[in-house]
Amino acid sequence: MNLFDTLKKNEDEEIDENGEVKQNIRHITQYNNKVQSNDIENKEENKKLYIKSENNEDTYEKYRKLRNEIEKHNKAYYDEDAPLISDAEYDKLIRELKALEEGNPELKEIYNRESASGDAVTPTEKIGGTVSEKFSKVTHKVPMLSLSNTYNISEIEDFDQRARKIIVLDKKLEYILELKLDGLSISLIYEKGVLKQGITRGDGQVGEDVTENIREIKSIPKRLKQPVNIEVRGEVVLPISNFNKVNQEREEAGEDVFANPRNAAAGTIRQLDSSIVKERGLDCYLYYLVNPENFGVKTHEESINYIESLGFKTTKIFEKYSDFKKLELAIDKWHTEREKLDYETDGLVIKVNDFSYYNELGYTTKSPRWAIAYKFPAEQVKTKLYDITLQVGRTGVITPVAELEAVNLSGSVVKRASLHNFDEIRRKDIKIGDNVIIEKAAEIIPQVVNVVFDDRNGSEKNIEIPVECPVCDTKLIKEEGQVALKCPNPLCPEKVKREIEYFVSRDAMNITGLGEKIVEKFIELKKIETVVDIYSLKNYKEELEGLEKMGKKSVENLLNSIEESKNREYNKVLYALGIPFVGKFNANLLTKNFRSIDILKEKSIEELTQIKGIGEKASVAVYEYLKNENNWKKILKLKEIGLKFEYDSAEEKEIEDNPIKGKNFLATGKLEKYKREEIKDIILAKGGNYISGVSKNLDFLIAGEKAGSKLEKAEKLGVRILSEVEFEKEFL
C-alpha cells in the first residue's frame, strides 16, 4: 500500500487514546438527534434550532472567534513570515480549538456553511499556509505532512503505547531521536543526480517552486555523488550568527527586523531576487528520504547514512533508543545542549526507526502516526519595563531599547531588550511601567513578547516618539517607505563612533587596538570627527600613551596597524565605508565589475541592478551614498591618504600565478598561528575556494589539533592533509 492509499484508508478513521479504531462520521450526531430533517433548504433554520435548544450560542461564538484568530496567525506566520505570537501560544490556541471540535463535532459544519470562503478545512487539520502567487505552483507527488507535537514527555510514552498496540507488538520499538530544526521545510528533486527542482511545503499538497533561490544555497549539492532519481526533504535554516548580522543590517537601514531565524529563512527563500539568498548565507539540512524502498533502505538510520553518502548535509545529531528512561534523559540533555548550536531548534523529533511499520501505523489527515515532535517550552519570564533609552546606530537609525528590571532568563541576567522601532511599540501597546513578558529569540536575543495588560494600574506612561537625536539634538527624519527614525547629522558623535567601529573591524580595515574608550576620548577632544581622522592619530602619539591602559608598545602597535591598513584591497575598503546593503559579497561583486570608485560613482541605479547578484535596494543605497557630497569628500580624503579605491592589476596577476587559485580548501581543528577566518580570507584573496564540508571535491584540508571527524573523512576520501607550516611553505 502506497502513501496515497494509506491516506485514503485513514481519512475516515481515527485512533482514540485506547488504540481503538472508530469511524469518523462526517454528519452531525447531536444536530441530527435534535432535528430529524434532511431538507437542505432548512439547514440554516436547523442551525438556529440547535443553538437555541442546546443553549450553545456562547460555545459557537467562542469557536468562531478562536478559528478566525488562528487563521489570522496562520496568515502572519506562513504567508507573511511575521508571526504575531510565539509557537507555544499558537499551539495552545490549536489545542483549545481541537478540544471544542471533539466535544462539539457539529461546530465545524455550522461554521463552514456560515463562512464566506466555504473552506471546509479546519485549522486543526490544515498543513502549512497558502501558496504565494509570486512562484509557480507544484503538486507534491507525495504530500508533505506536518508532525503532531507535544510539550509533555508523558505524551511521548502514550504515543509509544498506541504505536505498539496498532502493530500488535509486544517488544519495545526502536526510535530515532533527532533535533527539530526551526526553518522552512523544503523538498529537493534530482534526476540522474542533477538538481531539478526545489519546492516549499505550501499547504502540504501544493508548494511553491523556489528552484532558482535554492541553487544559491551552498550546502545544497547541484550534482549528487551518484546519478540517482531521488526526492529528499529537509529544512532551510538561517544560522544564528548570520541572523544577527542580517537583523543588524536591517535595523541600521531602518527596515523591519525578522522575528526569528525561521522567519528570516522563509522570507529569504520567498525573495524574487536570488542574489539576496546567496548574500544572507542560508543553510540546509536534510532528514527525510521519499520512497526509501526504491533504494533498498529499510530504516530511518540507514536513510540518513544514504543521504549523507550522496553529498547532502545532515545535522549528524540523531540518537537511537528503545528504553524510554534513556530517551527522557536525552530530551533533558538537549534542553541545554542545543544552546551551543549555530542554528535554531524548537524541539526534538521521535521517529520509529523501522520503515516496515510505517504503512501499518498510517497517517491522520495532517500527520504521520510513526513520529511525534517534542517541543521545548520557550522560557519566558515577567519583569517590569521601567524606562526607554535611545540608541543611535552607524547609519543614524534610532533604536528604542527597553530598560528592564534585572531578571534571569535561560541562564543569563537580562536587563535590556531592543524594541526595534516605534511602530513595534505602538503595535504591542507598550508603556513605561508595564509588566512585560520577555523571552530569548534564537536563544540569545532578549525580546519583549507582550504586555501583561491585567497588571496595569493606571500609572503607566505612554512612550513619546522623539523629535531630536538624543546625542546631537539634530532634528530626526523618517525616510519614505522606512519604519525607522534617523539622525541625518554626519558628524553626530555616536554615528561617528559606530562608523569607526565598523571601519576598523576585522572584515573591513582590520585595525587592531582602536578600542571604544580611545575612540570616545578622541571624539570628545575633537581629534576625530570622521574615519579619515584615524590616519591622523600618529600626530597625537604622546596623548595616546597617556590614556588609561595604553603604553608605548600598545600605541606603537596601533599606529603600525593603522599604517598597514592602507594595503587593504579595494573590496575591503568599499565594505569598510558601511554603505547600507553592501556586505562582503556585494562589495566583491561591485569591485570586480567596476574597477575603481570613480567608475562606480558614475553608474546609474539601472546599470547597478544589471549586475547579477546586486539587488535594487543595494543599487539605490550605493548610488545615493556616492552622490552624497559629504560622503564623496570623505572618499577623496581617504584616497589622498593612500587607501585603495581601484582594482590592483598587480594583485590580479598575483592571483593568476598563485597555486591557490581554483583549489578547494577547508580548515579544521585548533590552529596555532591563524584564526579560521584569517585562513579563509587568505585563500579567497588569492583566488581559491573555501568550502563548508569534506567531500571528494575538497583538494586540501588544513588540520590543527583535535581535528576530529573531518580529518577522518578526508583521509578516507584521499584528500591531501596539510599542517599550518606545510600550507605556508607550499602556498604562501
Image (spheres, grey):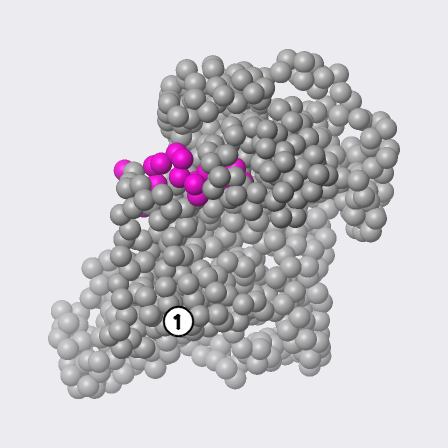
Relative image position of residue 367 (x, y in whole percent): 49, 65
| Front-most of residues 36 and 284 | 284
Relative image position of residue 709 (x, y in whole percent): 79, 50
Secondary-structure class at tag 1: strand
Q: Amino acid at mark 1?
A: Lys
Q: Is residue 614 left or right of residue 325?
A: left
Relative image position of residue 619 (x, y in whole percent): 41, 27
- Vertical arrangement, residue 356 with respect to residue 61, above or below: above
| Front-most of residues 398 and 689 | 398
Q: Is residue 675 left or right of residue 718?
A: left
Q: Is residue 407 visible?
A: yes
Residue beneath the point at 44% across and 35% down: 580
Reading the image, the residue beneath label 1 is: 384
Q: Which residues are magenta?
A: 480-501
- Vertical arrangement, residue 383 with respect to residue 690, above or below: below
Q: Is residue 149 left or right of residue 219?
A: left
- Vertical arrangement, residue 295 with respect to residue 18, above or below: above
Tell me, yes or no, whether the highlighted magenta stretch contains residue 436: no
| Front-most of residues 106 and 81 | 81
Q: How many marks?
A: 1
Residue beneath the point at 70% across and 25% down: 686
The quadrant of the image that shows the N terminus is bottom right
The quadrant of the image that shows the C terminus is top right
Relative image position of residue 330 (x, y in whole percent): 67, 71
